[in-house]
Image (cartoon, grey):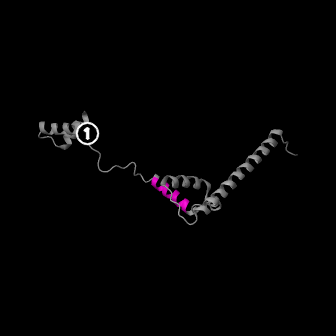
Amino acid sequence: MQPTLYPWQVLSVIVAGILNDQQQRVIDYLKEENRVLREQLGSKQIRLTDNQRRRLAVLGKALGRKVLSEICSIVTPDTIMRWHRKLIANKYDGSKARKPGRPRVMREIRKLVIRFALENRLWGYERIEGELGKL
């Protein structure tokens, strides 16, 4: 039994082929443009900002090392992967959540503790803490 092809299926395959062909031509053009720009730069080293490295690392990771080895012209695929690893390491290092030192005690609480201590000389810190807990 042979599967039945509907006209919309044939049409979708044709449109997909046309779009794929167009995308491939755009990619080929951009590759050649990169080669021309690279030739113009010669042996000069390109200085990238952290933001540029971050953007290349995110897009490069999505492509994968194999594809990068075919299209990279500015840096090597290993460099892009290293940037991505560093980006991920910095993202999850917890430095944004950390603050130096112990958090400060509110001024009102400090005044209240001092007042309790002065008014009740026999109370220790545990009793003062207990009384504060009741408030």
Q: Which residues are magenta?
A: 79-90
Question: Which of the 4 quarters of the picture holds residue 4?
Answer: top right
Q: Which one is in front, 102 or 130?
A: 102
Q: Residue at x 63, y 62 (%)?
A: 69
Q: Is residue 30 left or right of residue 16?
A: left
Q: Position of residue 90 (x, y in %)?
A: 45, 54
Q: Residue at x 87, y 46 (%)?
A: 2
Q: Position of residue 94 (x, y in %)?
A: 41, 51
Q: Which one is in front, 9 or 126?
A: 9
Check disc 1 and give the amino acid type.
Answer: Met
Q: Residue at x 85, y 44 (%)?
A: 3
Q: Is residue 11 left or right of residue 132?
A: right
Give the tally of numbered discs: 1
Q: Residue at x 48, y 58 (%)?
A: 86
- Within the magenta stretch, is there residue 64? no
Q: Position of residue 133 (x, y in %)?
A: 25, 37
Looking at the image, residue 89 lies above or below residue 107: below
View extreme (right): residue: 1
- Magenta: main secondary structure equals helix
Question: Which of the 4 quarters of the picture holds residue 78?
Answer: bottom right
Q: Quadrant of the C terminus?
A: top left
- Within the magenta stretch, is there residue 87? yes
To which residue does mark 1 refer?
106
What SS does tag 1 mark?
loop
Looking at the image, residue 128 lies above or below residue 92: above
View extreme (front): residue: 40
Q: Position of residue 100 (x, y in %)?
A: 32, 51
Q: Is residue 29 left or right of residue 44?
A: right
Looking at the image, residue 113 lies above or below residue 91: above
Q: Is residue 108 left or right of residue 2?
A: left
